[in-house]
């Protein structure tokens, strides 16, 4: 290389750096526009309302399914709750199986995929649009969703593939093909393919772009504004190192710190709530009043209900089918036991953690209401509630927690980044399972998916919140459309397993080891 | 009462010394030895989805490696000592699992080395020997 060329090679990055800020903003904008225009039709279809109403059909779809499973299995989420806890504690685990995946581990891993930004940012979005009343519907949807999760995770374990080398692959695509064939039903394969396509989109959307987007929002919230693609590239690099490079250390550190962060988050929320103990009654009053009147939010009661249901479904993923993939690896002779364990997931995720976030936002007075009428005031656009500092999404949660403890925004920033990261790792796995189901296993095929996954991290960090959150929700709900159809056809199988297990539990054939 | 001695063995130099001590003791008492090798494992640890998927396979590999690399050569080495030697290979918390093995074998005593964690970490988490001394159903000998 001659000197002139060398000089040019040095100069180019320097020039790039000088013009970076201006370019970066326009690059973010370009990515955003391109993304919004190419996904709009899909989002519109999934969220199209029933004719003449503002009620999206997909929300009804999920809630009706959860209600049907709740009734069909006779309130299983409440009946089996104590038994689920003793299963997780390991009371029924054979000591000779030590060293295999325990119920606790399967639950913890599935939870680290669902507990994340949905619980922090998602809830803030829901309460910011639907008001405190959204919390009521969110809790209700969480409780009902436990039955959906029970159904899908039982099937996930029952119809998983076990390979000769000892590894397992499970999830909706397997119960769709094998379960449908067993019952002599057609179209199982078709549904499995459709589900896998949506699962890949969901992995790239909610499991990836939404996470990258909100992680970036959280970082800028702490260190000041800078272009999203920078965060995106750094994140993509780390994700790449873990899922392609097999860098176990990062993954295992994350898996250890995430549960700690989760506990810290809930404890801090509890402390803030207790510090405002005199407001607890008022907050629940707002939640109940808001649930049935809307208290001035856009769309009134229906607006609150839609937001609550949407966030619950997005946060705990009940009926979506993703958890069925995560829970399939457990070592158990009874598939139903994993169903019991998995029903704790929406409870912990939505009924406990999401509710904490909502309560903190409400109790710290982030939402602005008219003192005279008690009605919440809306922003200029008329869609969202005014907040004290104009915060939205994760910034709203951060402001709520910081109003009590100034330092908490730093903890929250770290928590959000770690949650985002662990959710990405989980979803990269779900997406990969769907991908290999479609295209077959193989090193090159897997690498292709993983690289695509990393590219979407950059896109997600660069785009605006609106289009990203719309696409994320749409893709994840599309998975639920296919999955729930399959669950309706296969739920008699779960019922058979349930009855057989309960009778053997009663007779003492299934007993505690400890 | 059966005359069996359970010996905690992890392949370290100190555990080899412990085993030598146990063999001498067994000779003098006409006892049999159960060499216990515990692979540390908690059902409450956290794993990634990928690790979950491969766990069953890894467990098989770990057991095979422990059997081949640790236990088999040891039993062979002791074959001409005149003492009856059997082995036990388990997953779990080390002290708890040693107690389980003692109960399962109906052993009359258990012998472990003192090594492993020392200093700060054993102050916080406790040492295997210390915990075992507190929870064991049979007399414990700790070899320095």
Image (tube, coloured by chain):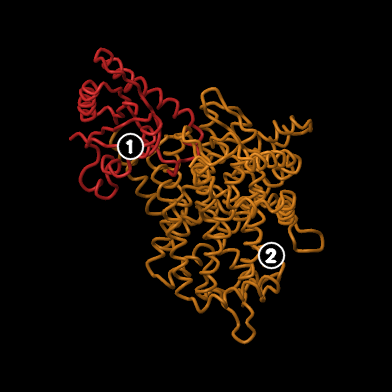
Is A208 left, or right, of A497 in this rendering?
left
Which chain is depicted red? B
Mark 2 Cα shell of 10 Å, populated few (<14), some (14-19), many (≥20): many
What is the residue that sits farthest to the bottom in this orientation?
A: A372
Front in this rendered view, residue A460 or A207: A207
Task: Name the N-terminal-most of marks 1 and 2.
Answer: 1
* Residue A204 drawn at (x, y percent): 57, 45
> Which residue lies at the image location 66% right of the left edge and 35% below the top edge?
A173
- From this viewpoint, which residue is outermost toward the top? B80
| Secondary structure found at label 2 | helix
Q: Are marks 1 and 2 in contact (CB under 8 Å)?
A: no
Q: Quadrant of the C terminus of chain B?
A: top left
Q: Position of residue A263 (x, y in %)?
A: 44, 57
Q: Residue furthest right?
A: A52
Q: Nearer the viewer, residue B63 or A14?
A: B63
**As rendered, which of A178 and A432 lies closer to the eye?**
A178
Q: Which mark is residue A5?
A: 1
x and y, in percent, of residue B6 in the image: 31, 29
Give the side of residue B121 with respect to residue A194, left or right.
Answer: left
Q: Which residue is mark 2?
A: A305
Chain identity for the colour orange used in the image = A
Vertical arrangement, residue A26 with respect to residue A503, above or below: below
How would you rate the neighbour count of disc 1 (Cα within 10 Å): few for under 14, some for 14-19, many for 20 or more? few
The subunit letter for the residue under badge 2 reads A
């Amino acid at each position: 290389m001659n000197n002139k060329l060398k000089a040019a090679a040095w100069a180019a990055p320097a020039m790039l750096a000088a013009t970076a800020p201006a370019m970066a903003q326009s690059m973010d904008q370009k990515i955003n526009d391109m993304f919004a225009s190419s996904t709009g039709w899909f989002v519109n279809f999934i969220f199209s309302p029933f004719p003449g109403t503002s009620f999206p059909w997909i929300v009804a779809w999920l809630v009706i399914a959860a209600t049907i499973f709740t009734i069909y299995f006779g309130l299983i989420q409440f009946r089996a709750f104590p038994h689920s806890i003793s299963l997780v504690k390991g009371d029924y685990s054979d000591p000779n199986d030590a060293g295999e995946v325990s119920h606790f581990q399967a639950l913890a891993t599935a939870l680290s995929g669902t507990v994340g930004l949905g619980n922090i940012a998602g809830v803030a979005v829901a309460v910011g649009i639907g008001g405190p009343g959204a919390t009521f519907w969110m809790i209700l949807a969480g409780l009902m969703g436990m039955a959906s999760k029970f159904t899908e995770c039982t099937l996930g374990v029952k119809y998983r593939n076990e390979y000769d080398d000892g590894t397992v692959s499970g999830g909706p695509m397997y119960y769709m093909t094998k379960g449908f064939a067993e019952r002599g039903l057609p179209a199982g394969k078709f549904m499995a393919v459709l589900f896998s396509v949506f699962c890949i989109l969901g992995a790239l959307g909610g499991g990836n772009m939404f996470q990258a987007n909100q992680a970036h929002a959280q970082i800028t919230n702490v260190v000041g504004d800078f272009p999203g693609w920078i965060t995106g590239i750094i994140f993509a690099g780390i994700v790449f190192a873990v899922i392609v490079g097999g860098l176990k250390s990062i993954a295992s550190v994350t898996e250890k710190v995430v549960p700690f962060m989760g506990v810290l988050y809930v404890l801090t929320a509890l402390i803030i709530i207790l510090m405002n103990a005199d407001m607890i009654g008022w907050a629940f009053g707002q939640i109940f009043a808001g649930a049935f009147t809307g208290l001035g939010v856009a769309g009134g009661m229906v607006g609150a209900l839609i937001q609550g249901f949407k966030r619950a479904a997005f946060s705990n993923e009940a009926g979506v089918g993703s958890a069925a993939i995560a829970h399939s690896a457990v070592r158990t002779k009874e598939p139903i036991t994993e169903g019991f364990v998995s029903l704790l997931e929406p409870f912990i995720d939505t009924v406990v953690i999401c509710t904490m976030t909502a309560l903190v936002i409400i109790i710290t007075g982030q939402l602005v209401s008219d003192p005279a009428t008690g009605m919440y005031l809306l922003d200029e656009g008329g869609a969202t509630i005014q907040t004290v500092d104009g915060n939205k999404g994760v910034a709203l949660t951060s402001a709520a927690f910081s109003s009590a403890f100034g330092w908490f925004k730093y903890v929250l920033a770290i928590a959000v980044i770690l949650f985002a990261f662990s959710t990405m790792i989980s979803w990269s796995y779900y997406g990969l399972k769907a991908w290999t189901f479609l295209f077959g296993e193989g090193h090159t095929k897997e690498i292709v998916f993983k690289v695509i996954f990393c590219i979407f991290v950059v896109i997600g960090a660069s785009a605006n919140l609106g289009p990203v959150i719309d696409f994320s929700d749409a893709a994840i709900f599309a998975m639920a459309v296919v999955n729930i159809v399959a669950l309706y056809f296969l739920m008699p199988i779960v019922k058979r397993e349930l009855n057989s297990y309960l009778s053997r539990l009663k007779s003492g054939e299934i007993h505690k080891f400890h | 009462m059966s005359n069996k001695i359970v010996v905690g063995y992890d392949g370290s130099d100190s555990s080899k010394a412990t085993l030598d001590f146990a063999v001498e003791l067994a000779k003098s008492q006409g006892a049999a030895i159960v060499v216990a090798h515990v692979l540390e494992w908690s059902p409450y640890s956290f794993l990634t989805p990928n690790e979950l998927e491969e766990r069953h396979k890894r467990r098989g590999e770990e057991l095979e490696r422990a059997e081949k690399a640790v236990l088999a050569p040891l039993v062979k080495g002791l074959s001409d000592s005149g003492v009856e030697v059997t082995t036990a290979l388990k997953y779990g918390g080390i002290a708890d699992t040693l107690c389980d093995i003692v109960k399962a074998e109906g052993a009359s005593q258990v012998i472990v080395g003192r090594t492993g964690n020392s200093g700060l970490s054993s102050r916080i988490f406790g040492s295997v020997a210390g915990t075992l001394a507190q929870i064991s159903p049979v007399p414990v000998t700790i070899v320095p």
